[in-house]
């Protein structure tokens, strides 16, 4: 759920091609996005940092609705406080802004296996 439509579409194509994911639900952050995510019953959610900046309770609400959901945040800075806040909220993965496409693919593979991911430079 990235703010930028072009980025959402590029990530969707990348995940389908590199991971063989058959179903990717993409949506921008709107009032109905949470409902779409809950209805999809997705297992892994790749979430843009801007979504939690504007709605700090988003992850808590999603995990309450879908306890088995694995959230991966993308686009974060290297701030320790941001990282600790995401870990406390139950995020499975943390991908920095400077991550490459392959970093993203590898992180999604790891999270799919149940591993926590913390991308670093």
Image (tube, rainbow, N blue to C red):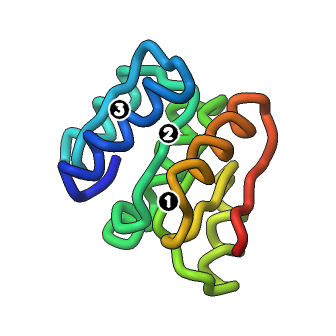
Q: Residue at x 35, y 67 (%)?
A: 50
Name the residue that disc number 1 marks: 74
Q: Nearer the viewer, mark 3 or mark 1?
A: 3
Q: Quadrant of residue 12?
A: top left
Secondary structure beneath dot 1 equals: strand
Pointer 2 or 3: first along the chain: 3
Crowd around label 2: few <14 · some 14–19 · many ≥20 (10 Å): many
Q: Residue at x 45, y 25 (%)?
A: 17
Where residue 98 appears, x then y in whole percent? 52, 72
Name the residue that disc number 3 marks: 13
Secondary structure beneath dot 2 equals: strand
- Rounded to the nearest angstrom, the CA distance separating label 1 from label 2 is 10 Å
Q: Is residue 105 above or below residue 44?
A: below
Q: Nearer the viewer, mark 1 or mark 2?
A: 1
Q: Nearer the viewer, mark 2 or mark 3?
A: 3
Pointer 1 or 2: first along the chain: 2
In the image: residue 67, left or right of residue 29: right
Q: Residue at x 78, y 48 (%)?
A: 116
Pointer 3 or 1: first along the chain: 3
- Rounded to the nearest angstrom, the CA distance separating label 2 from label 3 is 15 Å
Q: Residue at x 53, y 29 (%)?
A: 18
Residue 46: image tag = none
Name the residue that disc number 2 marks: 45
In the image: residue 67, left or right of residue 16: right
- Rounded to the nearest angstrom, the CA distance separating label 3 from label 1 is 16 Å
Where residue 49 appears, x then y in whole percent? 43, 65
Q: Is residue 102 above or below residue 83?
A: above
């Amino acid at each position: 759920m990235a703010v930028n439509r072009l980025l959402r579409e590029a990530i969707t194509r990348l995940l389908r091609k590199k991971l063989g994911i058959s179903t990717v639900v993409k949506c921008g952050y709107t009032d109905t996005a949470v409902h779409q995510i809950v209805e999809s019953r997705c297992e892994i959610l790749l979430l843009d940092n801007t979504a939690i900046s504007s709605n700090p309770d988003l992850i808590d609400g999603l995990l309450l609705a879908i306890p088995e959901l694995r959230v991966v945040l993308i686009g974060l800075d290297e701030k320790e406080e941001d990282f600790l806040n995401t870990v406390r909220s139950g995020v499975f993965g943390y991908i920095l802004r400077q991550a490459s496409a392959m970093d993203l693919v590898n992180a999604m593979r790891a999270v799919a296996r149940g591993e926590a991911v913390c991308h670093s430079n």
